[in-house]
Image: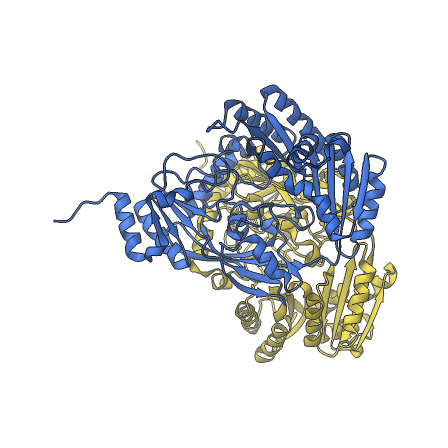
Chain colours: A yellow, B blue
């Protein structure tokens, strides 16, 4: 007599048979893998977590899940902010954080080949030993993975000059939904054979394939860096000053703009005295052999507009100036539960966008703090919510919706670098339009006809 | 009594009805639109050429062609080198060269919106009036179109520092095979909503959709430029010197390496005396505020390896130094019919690749001249054939095949920037592998289920 097993049991049995015992977590052990850092929660707990140690484990997991039509949620470090790695009841989490080896680092070709679970900052550090760096630097670089960064096409502070994650990825080893391995791209900096699936997979939030290795481009470390900090009376004045720097054809490697409420929150948390110096702080970094000359030009241009300007080429002093940006999010997290938004607008619309965010905050009576990657037009309005409420209140959803609508009206996008995940799906069609939305769904089906890869995310 | 029309006649009748008379060429008037500059020829002449003046003409043409399953070949200026715009019997050429308006050029946002038929150099010139430039600069920039450059993801001389066409394209208006318009991407420099269809369409050689407008990124013109010319005894020594510059973390905006036979051909055509100075010439350009300092460093590094080095920051003198590169192809075209190849290898493999090309030339008794975008590892071996032969001789095909095989063995690609077109299709699967090849065909079907868009190309 054979026991008739349900789908879940059949899958677990197959995974137990074909994977090492240490590669599988079930029951309460799966709980820590159910959510990312978005603050949103799926219904229930995942069926199991597979801690893949190599590409074979990934293939085995997908092969079985595909045969049984069980949803699979790929996961790096779980630091995403849009719910892209949230895993609810009936799903298998494919945890790639143990695939964390740097397989190759070639200083002559200035490339590295890494497993997806390598921590981004560790790759950067390893490249640094050869005078190189991995340019993409999301604020989460110390805790997020290269694979997760690729899945969201993560941005960061250096994007203005060095581009986003997509610009650093040359090729991918990936496994399709049915377990088929493919290798996209190449080890060369140029190449146009076939469609650019490397770029297509970058930013696809685990819905098209699971990345098992990435070939990435490294870049020379800059010879020098110079830092400028300028205070303004209002955020709008800071944004206009940034527009003037852009018009003067300056290309800073970093341009962070913090609003007055953020400065106040940092003061409150850290005992500093930033808010009294102005209603906005613009932090610039210039790098390369002409860093000092560029910083000097920036100071000259900012002097008439700013309440105060200071500059330094000295690393410790630079760190002091930058600490306000670094401490912004932790300081806000002390005030309540944060919902981190992520719109981008054409660079000239930065000041307008912040004015609209202020109006929206008032309309819905929600506290919103904003900082921006100013040279990119990428804003992070941070909604600070009552820590007691488990769910996101309606007023916050409405405020977020109004922010997205404003971004689209200004010619922008509802996510600059964090991804759509689950949180922004309801606005997705507004940005894509029905024809492109349908086309994207056909592309999804070409990769994953049974929709087992991260269903309910991104698209 | 109604006349029973064949498919061709039905289509022509519909196009005559729905398009202005001036938008349609048939018969011998279609002949100039049958080939690109690859030197390959399709069988017969196209059925008709539609000279689209706007996106509606594109939609109308595709709608009718799709309904009748007639192949459509999109065409910019026809300057492609891989047969991608070749149009044989029974096809409709969709000529986009009359859609040549710059619709918007916004110096504050540093973007332009252009129709696909805008000549690349004209966009660059228009941007120049605002102290900006359009960075992608294929050697054909003076005669090729932005749309054609996007279709092939064209490279150029500045790629080493500024990236390829894909890196400059932010969004596209495109029409799908059945006439449905879609708008991909955005006007912002960052954005991750949905799959990156902008990148997917870039380099898809007209097989996925027809581009009717492009939003592109502009960049500041560099403050200064410095040029270095260094002669070496052999190409391999020049390639090794380039590797040393890369290892020293120099990022020239241009690094062109010409072999001895190319120098000899330039001498013969122009009456110069380059070949006597060495067996290879490396031309570097550094740009930005530290251009002179970078050029000085390059000279210092090259001095021990080179037979001679010279440098200048003076534009006329720089032009004189660069003229050898500029005159290379015209000089080779005097010697016979040229077949321009386009492999890329990891940067460290440049010298090895050229050694292999020399062996291959000897093996098949084919004359091959090589120049390279040295900082990218992108080589252009130019096969010079008997001008009398109409077809490409077998020995040339075999030599080309051996070159591609060598490129793949060295970790490279069979096309760095020109595209697959028709000429390289027979080697495509070798690079992609069967699984990725099948996946790419499924993506093609998601865009164009009846395969009417540029069939027989790219994939």
Residue nearer the viewer, A179 or B22: B22
- Residue B393 coordinates in the image, percent (x, y): 50, 25
- Left or right of B173, for residue B225: right
Residue for point 51% across, 34% down: B435
Q: Quadrant of residue A1?
A: top left
- Left or right of A330, for residue B404: left
- Residue B156 coordinates in the image, percent (x, y): 62, 45
Residue for point 55% across, 37% down: A182
- Identify the residue at the far front of this view: B271
How many marks are shown on the rendered structure? 0
Q: Quadrant of residue B189?
A: bottom right
- Residue A42 coordinates in the image, percent (x, y): 55, 57
Q: With respect to residue A3, does A146 lie above or below? A: below
Q: Is residue B139 in sight in this rendering?
A: yes
Residue for point 74% across, 39% down: B282
Q: Is residue B278 in sight in this rendering?
A: no
Q: With respect to residue B272, does A287 lie above or below? A: below
Q: Quadrant of residue A51?
A: top right
Residue nearer the viewer, A46 or B79: B79
- Residue A186 coordinates in the image, percent (x, y): 62, 38
């Amino acid at each position: 007599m054979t026991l008739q097993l349900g789908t879940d049991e059949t899958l677990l049995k197959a995974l137990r048979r074909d994977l090492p015992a240490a590669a599988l977590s079930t029951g309460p052990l799966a709980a820590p893998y159910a959510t990312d850092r978005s603050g949103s929660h799926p219904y229930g707990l995942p069926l199991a977590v597979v801690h893949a140690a190599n590409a074979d484990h990934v293939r085995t997991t997908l092969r079985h899940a595909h045969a049984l039509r069980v949803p699979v949620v790929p996961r790096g470090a779980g630091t995403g902010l849009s719910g892209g790695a949230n895993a609810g009841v009936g799903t298998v989490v494919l945890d790639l954080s143990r695939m964390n080896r740097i397989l190759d680092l070639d200083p002559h070709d200035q490339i590295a080949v890494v497993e997806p679970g390598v921590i981004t900052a560790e790759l950067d550090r390893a490249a640094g030993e050869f005078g190189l760096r991995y340019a993409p630097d999301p604020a989460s670089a110390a805790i997020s993975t290269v694979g997760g960064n690729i899945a969201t096409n993560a941005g960061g502070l250096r994007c203005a000059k060095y581009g986003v994650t997509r610009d650093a990825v040359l090729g991918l080893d990936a496994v399709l939904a049915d377990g088929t391995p493919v290798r996209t791209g190449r080890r060369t900096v140029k190449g146009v054979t076939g469609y650019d699936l490397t770029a297509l997979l970058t930013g696809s939030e685990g819905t098209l394939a699971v990345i098992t290795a990435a070939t990435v481009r490294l870049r020379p470390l800059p010879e020098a860096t110079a830092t400028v900090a300028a205070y303004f009376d209002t955020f709008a004045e800071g944004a206009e000053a940034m527009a003037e720097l852009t018009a003067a054809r300056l290309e800073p490697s970093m341009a962070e703009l913090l609003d007055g409420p953020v400065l106040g929150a940092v003061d409150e948390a850290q005992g500093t005295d930033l808010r009294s110096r102005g209603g906005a702080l613009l932090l610039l970094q210039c790098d390369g052999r002409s860093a000092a000359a560029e910083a000097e030009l920036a100071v000259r241009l900012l002097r008439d507009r700013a309440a105060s300007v200071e500059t330094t080429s000295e690393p410790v002093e630079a760190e002091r100036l930058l600490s306000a940006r670094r401490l912004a999010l932790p300081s806000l997290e002390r005030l309540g539960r944060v919902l981190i938004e992520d719109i981008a607008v054409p660079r000239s619309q930065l000041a307008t966008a912040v004015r609209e965010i202020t109006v929206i905050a008032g309309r819905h009576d929600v506290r919103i703090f904003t900082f921006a990657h100013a040279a990119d037009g990428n804003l992070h309005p941070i909604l600070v919510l009552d820590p007691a409420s488990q769910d996101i209140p309606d007023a916050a959803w409405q405020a977020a919706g109004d922010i997205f609508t404003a971004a689209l009206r200004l010619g922008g996008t509802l996510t600059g670098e964090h991804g759509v995940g689950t949180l922004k799906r309801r606005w997705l069609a507004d940005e894509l339009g029905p024809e492109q939305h349908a086309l994207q769904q056909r592309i999804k089906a070409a990769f994953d006809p049974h929709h087992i890869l991260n269903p309910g995310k991104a698209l």
